Image (spheres, helix red, strand yellow):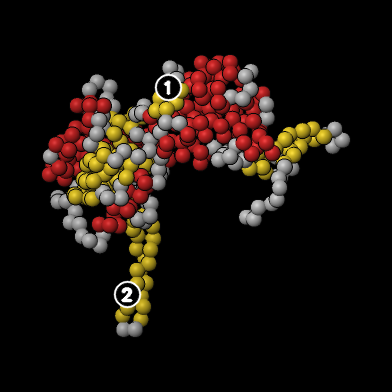
């Protein structure tokens, strides 16, 4: 788990990169930015808040022949070896970004390269390099007073509540291409940032496997459990799956199947589905792995636990207490109305 609250920005360089295909210019600052007590806390929040709020999907640098030929890997290695070189390396990083800015949709903007101290990953302190880009500008009013008259002026600037693009390169796993987090608020040019500029691949770690296996379970529930049984059982299957992940530190597939799959007839269906679909989720030979709690929490938020009926009624199932649905919700068929029904038992209505 990442902790950025005690992180300190020890150095910051700011440049501007234009769109190369539109013949826009590149501006490289001659010196690092002189930070002060007023703006530095605001910039720290601007840079780091998106990473605190985001699921931790780690990447690493990759190169088809050797990492030593990777532009950003080389720059990061030089910075970590000698942090005093970060400003000169920030120019190379910004020029590399400029060279990738050759599509008409790519927006010009400011590039910030920061050396970060005191970053924590899994309670281990380390240094990191932050590369951030602000693209979208917003209008705002500035006021001045002249002889008892208030004047308003329209100006443009960066909204400090939203970072457009950014990455954190952690001083860890150098031989594998470092550990990297990335955010991109503008989905229309994701390939430009992740593939062309960063040139990274998803790291197959505990978080990766937990996320991929839960996504596989979600699709199995939709494609197999729902047609074979009903919407309630689809929801309950995912309910049991998520709870199994939440209460265990390590995943073991046989134990998972025995606990989560209520209907024995679905066990061979589960095995067949995994055999057919496993390459899509990168879980071909995956039967055991440590469970990442952050991935489980993120998956729980995304998985729908609502049965939506065509009579404009919703039934929300409780993911924390799944036994309630088994004990107190029944599904049946009404011959007179020729309609399905859900029968819900309760003692009293709860105050909302």
In the image, residue 289 above or below residue 143? above
In the image, residue 83 above or below residue 206? below
- At horizontal 28% and vertical 27% (from top left) the residue drawn is 62
Is the residue marked by circle 1 packed among few (<14), some (14-19), or many (20+) residues within 10 Å?
few
- Foreground: 239 or 249? 249
Q: Where is mark 1, residue-wise?
A: 288
Q: Residue furthest front?
A: 347
Q: Which label sits in the foreground, 1 or 2? A: 1
Are the residues at dot 1 and dot 2 in contact (C-beta closer than 8 Å)?
no
How far from the left and from the top, in percent, is residue 186?
41, 43
Q: Quadrant of the C terminus?
A: bottom right
Residue 24 visible (yes or no)? no
What's the distance in space between the residues labelled 1 and 2, CA to CA?
65 Å
How far from the left and from the top, in percent, is residue 11?
19, 49
In the image, residue 16 above or below residue 260? below
Is the residue marked by circle 2 packed among few (<14), some (14-19), or many (20+) residues within 10 Å?
few
> Of label 1 and label 2, which has the lower sequence position?
2
Q: Where is mark 2, residue-wise?
A: 144
How far from the left and from the top, in percent, is residue 293?
42, 36
Q: Secondary structure at mark 2?
A: strand
User: In terms of image quadrants, where is residue 320?
Assistant: top right
């Amino acid at each position: 788990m990442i902790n950025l609250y005690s992180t300190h920005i020890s150095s910051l360089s700011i440049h501007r990169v234009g769109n190369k295909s539109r013949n826009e210019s590149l501006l490289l600052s001659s010196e690092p930015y002189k930070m002060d007590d007023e703006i530095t806390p605001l910039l720290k929040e601007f840079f780091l808040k998106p990473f605190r709020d985001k699921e931790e999907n780690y990447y690493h640098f990759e190169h088809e022949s050797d990492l030593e030929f990777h532009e950003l890997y080389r720059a990061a290695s030089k910075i970590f070896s000698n942090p005093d070189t970060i400003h000169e390396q920030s120019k190379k990083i910004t020029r590399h970004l400029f060279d990738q800015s050759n599509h008409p949709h790519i927006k010009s903007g400011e590039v910030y390269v920061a050396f970060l101290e005191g970053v924590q990953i899994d309670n281990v302190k380390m240094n990191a390099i932050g590369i951030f880009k602000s693209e979208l500008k917003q209008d705002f009013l500035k006021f001045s007073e002249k002889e008892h008259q208030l004047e308003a002026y329209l100006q443009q600037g960066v909204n400090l509540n939203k970072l457009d693009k950014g990455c954190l390169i952690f001083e860890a796993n150098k031989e594998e291409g470092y550990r990297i987090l990335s955010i991109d608020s503008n989905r229309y040019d994701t390939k430009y940032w992740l593939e062309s500029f960063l040139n990274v691949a998803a790291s197959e770690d505990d978080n990766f496997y937990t996320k991929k296996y839960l996504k596989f379970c979600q699709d199995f529930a939709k494609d197999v459990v729902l047609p074979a049984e009903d919407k309630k059982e689809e929801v309950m299957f995912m309910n049991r799956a998520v709870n199994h992940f939440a209460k265990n530190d390590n995943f073991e597939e046989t134990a998972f199947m025995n606990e989560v799959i209520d209907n024995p007839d679905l066990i061979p269906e589960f095995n067949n589905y995994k055999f057919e679909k496993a390459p899509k989720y990168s879980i071909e030979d995956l039967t055991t792995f440590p469970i990442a709690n952050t991935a489980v929490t993120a998956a729980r938020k995304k998985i729908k636990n609502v049965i939506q009926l065509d009579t404009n009624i919703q039934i929300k199932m409780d993911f924390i207490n799944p036994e309630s649905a088994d004990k107190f919700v029944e599904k049946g068929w009404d011959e007179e109305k020729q309609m399905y029904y859900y029968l819900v038992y309760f003692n009293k209505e709860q105050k909302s």
